Structures are given as structure tokens and as C-alpha cells.
């Protein structure tokens, strides 16, 4: 019999549910994702560091746990909220169930609550702190503690600590991937296109990156407030001035914009899911994309040598930037989306074309 569990919101609202996964109390930033599939990729995405993730799709876990679908070996999120978790998964690739996996990884979950009502609260009031606990008691001290909750050391906690290499036979390009909390599928997409990969920690200097003689530099996704990474931004400024081709995704997109003089802002509740519409301004085409971010580049803050290339179809926020003074571009969404959609995977080929031009 599952133990009673309670989700307490920063505004004092309490939801009663049942515990699953690890039994431990946790606090985090409450965010929701609208993806209907890909819950394993969500659970193992480092960009959720310090957050409690709410799945809007009502049944989670129906195809079990499949480790080859993981984006990183260990979840970075603080907690997990679902309407219902499947106790008897069925899939020919299934290697276990969600409850056991969350227990192994020490991630607490809560189920059986009205996730639709909870999502509406977040949409109306914006991202807020929440707490999973095992008593309905809400004290003034608890509410004060939640209001003061801040995610810190996000990139430092999710980047690798030592350089790693992923070679391919007959490589045409050598790409350095700066890991700010990278999803593994970024590397897979580069490898399958003939790129040997060197993955370096977030704190790697521009001089150290250039010493590796890359044909291009990839800036990964990652968690947290982009503006808090002052040292990284300073190195990216030097790296972008070097003329090496650069491609940024999600946090990498934001950090590159900051390095070129732009600003970022926190969104009310962010964009998280696998069904976010993005409009390409040059062609008018709309792509369906996978996204996971709570901050955005402020379009009006971009320098004159930077052009907004994509905007969000729902709120018109910046979703991509092309630079005219350096060989670089970036997108807020995830063209490497593992679990889909794959509408924008052609951006990796654009990056290869940019490296080709630079080598000539």
C-alpha cells in the first residue's frame, strides 16, 4: 500500500496523493512538461536540475525503463509528479519499471493528484517552489523557506569533470562539445554525421578549446539561469571572436547571446514538451520542436550583427539567432530531440556546412 504524500505549493495550496519512487522529502522549482512520450528522456535530462517535474500526460511508465534511451546515467531533477504511473509496463525493450528506477536513483515521486488543476495553477501564477512531504502540515517557516529557494551551481553540478573523447572512423570533422549539462543525443547526432567528438567541462577556457584544433564548437543545453555563468560567458566571448564555427542549443544558445552582448529573461512558466511550435522567419515555415527552458534571449537586446531566425509560435519569444559577423548560430529548441520530434535535425547539417566553409 502506497504511503500518503502531499505536494505543498509556495502559495500554500496542498495536494494530497500517494508516494512512489524514493521516499524522501524534497523541495524544488515546480515546472510542467506537455510531452506525451519520452518520459525517460525527461527524467534523465540535466536541464531539470533543481526542479520538480510535473507530467501533464496522465499515464506515465507504460513502456517501462529502457536505459539506452537515457540522456545521462543519473537524473538531476529533485522530484517527479504524475497523475498515474503504470505498474505493469509492456514493451519488448522494457528492462524494469518506473517505481524501481526512481527508488534506485533516490528520486521521490507523487502520484494520484489532479495534475490538470496543478498545471493550470502554474500557468496562471507562474513557476513556483513546491515541496513533496509526508504530512499535510504547512507552517509559516516552511512557506518562507520555499519562497527563498533558489537553484544554485546548476551547470557546475551537471557538467562532466574530465575531458572525454568519442571518435568515429574516417572522421571528416573534429567538434569540441562544451558540456553545460549536455544530453547524450547531441553527441550521437554529431558522431553519426562523421564528427569525432571531444567533450570538455563547462569551465574549459577558450585557449584550451582552441588548443584542441576543433573544426567547430558545439555549445550544449543545460540547467539554471544563464546569466549566472559569468566566467563561461567571458570565455565564450573570446571563443566566438576567434572565428571558429559555433552552434549553440538551449542554454548554449543563451550563453552565446550573452557573450555577444544580449540579455536574457525568465519566462512566466517556460516551454517544456515535445510539441512546441517554432516559426522560421526567413521561410515562414513552422516546425514542431522539443523544448525545455525557463529563460529566453531578449530579442530587442541583440546586437546589430545578430538576427532573430526563429520565434515561438505561441508567445513570439526568441527561438533562434544567426550571427552575421562570426560563423555562428544557435537555437533555443532541441534539434537532437531523442524521442522526437525530429523536424529540425537538419540544423546539424547546417553546422557541418559551416565547418566545410571554414576549412576551405
Image (tube, helix red, strand yellow):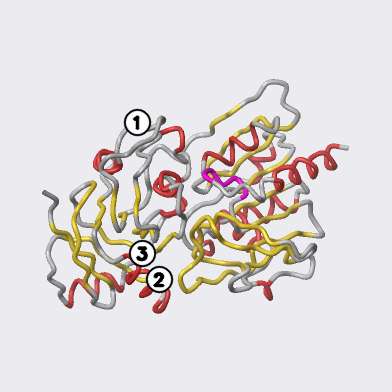
N-term mark: 2 or 1: 1
Return the residue nearer the eye: 213 or 224.
Answer: 224
What residue did someone put label 1 on? Answer: 95
Q: Are marks 3 and 2 in contact (CB under 8 Å)?
A: yes
The mark tally for this picture is 3
Lateral position of residue 68 relative to residue 100, left or right: right
Lateral position of residue 136 relative to residue 352, left or right: left
The quadrant in which residue 265 appears is bottom right
- In the orientation shown, which residue stands out farthest toward the top? 169
The image quadrant where one finds the C terminus is top right
Where's residue 192, x and y in %?
Answer: 65, 31
What residue did someone put label 2 on? Answer: 127
Q: Residue at x 66, y 30 (%)?
A: 196
Return the residue nearer the eye: 341 or 198.
Answer: 341
Q: Residue at x 49, y 60 (%)?
A: 272
Q: Which mark is residue 75?
A: none
Q: CA distance from mark 2 to mark 1?
A: 34 Å
**Label 3 neighbour load within 10 Å: few <14, some 14-19, many 20+:** many
- What is the chief secondary structure element of the magenta stretch? loop
What span is colored magenta in the figure? Answer: 335-339
Residue 160 lies within the magenta run: no
The quadrant in which residue 166 appears is top right
Q: Which mark is residue 29?
A: 3
Q: Secondary structure at mark 2?
A: loop
Q: CA distance from mark 3 to mark 2?
A: 7 Å
Residue 337 lies within the magenta run: yes
N-term mark: 3 or 1: 3
**Label 1 neighbour load within 10 Å: few <14, some 14-19, many 20+:** some
Amino acid at each position: 500500500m502506497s504511503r500518503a504524500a502531499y505536494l505543498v505549493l509556495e502559495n500554500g495550496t496542498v495536494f494530497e496523493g500517494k508516494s512512489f519512487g524514493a521516499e524522501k522529502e524534497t523541495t524544488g522549482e515546480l515546472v510542467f512538461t506537455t510531452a506525451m512520450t519520452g518520459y525517460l528522456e525527461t527524467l534523465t535530462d540535466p536541464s531539470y536540475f533543481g526542479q520538480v517535474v510535473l507530467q501533464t500526460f496522465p499515464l506515465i511508465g507504460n513502456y517501462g525503463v529502457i536505459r539506452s534511451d537515457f540522456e545521462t546515467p543519473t537524473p538531476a531533477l529533485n522530484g517527479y509528479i504524475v497523475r498515474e504511473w503504470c505498474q505493469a509496463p509492456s514493451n519488448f525493450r522494457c528492462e524494469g519499471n518506473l517505481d524501481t528506477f526512481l527508488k534506485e536513483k533516490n528520486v521521490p515521486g507523487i502520484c494520484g493528484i489532479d495534475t490538470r488543476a496543478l498545471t493550470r495553477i502554474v500557468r496562471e501564477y507562474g513557476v513556483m517552489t513546491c515541496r513533496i512531504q509526508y504530512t499535510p502540515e504547512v507552517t509559516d517557516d516552511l512557506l518562507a523557506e520555499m519562497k527563498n529557494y533558489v537553484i544554485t551551481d546548476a551547470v557546475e553540478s551537471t557538467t562532466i569533470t574530465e575531458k572525454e573523447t568519442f571518435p568515429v572512423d574516417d572522421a571528416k570533422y573534429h567538434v569540441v562539445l562544451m558540456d553545460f549539462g549536455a544530453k547524450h543525443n547531441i553527441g550521437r547526432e554529431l558522431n553519426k554525421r562523421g564528427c569525432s567528438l571531444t567533450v570538455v567541462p563547462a569551465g574549459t577556457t577558450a585557449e584550451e578549446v582552441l588548443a584542441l584544433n576543433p573544426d567547430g564548437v558545439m555549445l550544449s543545453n543545460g540547467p539554471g539561469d544563464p546569466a549566472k555563468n559569468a566566467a563561461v560567458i567571458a570565455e565564450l566571448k573570446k571563443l566566438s571572436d576567434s572565428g571558429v564555427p559555433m552552434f549553440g542549443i538551449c542554454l548554449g544558445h543563451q550563453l552565446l547571446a550573452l557573450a555577444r552582448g544580449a540579455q536574457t529573461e525568465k519566462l512566466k512558466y517556460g516551454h517544456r514538451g515535445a510539441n512546441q511550435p517554432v516559426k522560421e522567419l526567413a521561410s515562414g515555415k513552422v516546425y514542431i520542436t522539443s523544448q525545455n527552458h525557463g529563460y529566453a534571449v531578449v530579442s530587442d537586446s541583440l546586437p546589430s550583427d545578430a538576427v532573430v531566425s526563429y520565434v515561438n509560435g505561441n508567445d513570439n519569444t526568441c527561438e533562434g539567432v544567426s550571427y552575421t559577423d562570426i560563423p555562428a548560430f544557435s537555437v533555443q529548441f532541441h534539434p537532437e530531440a531523442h524521442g522526437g520530434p525530429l523536424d529540425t535535425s537538419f540544423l546539424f547539417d547546417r553546422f557541418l556546412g559551416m565547418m566545410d566553409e571554414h576549412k576551405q
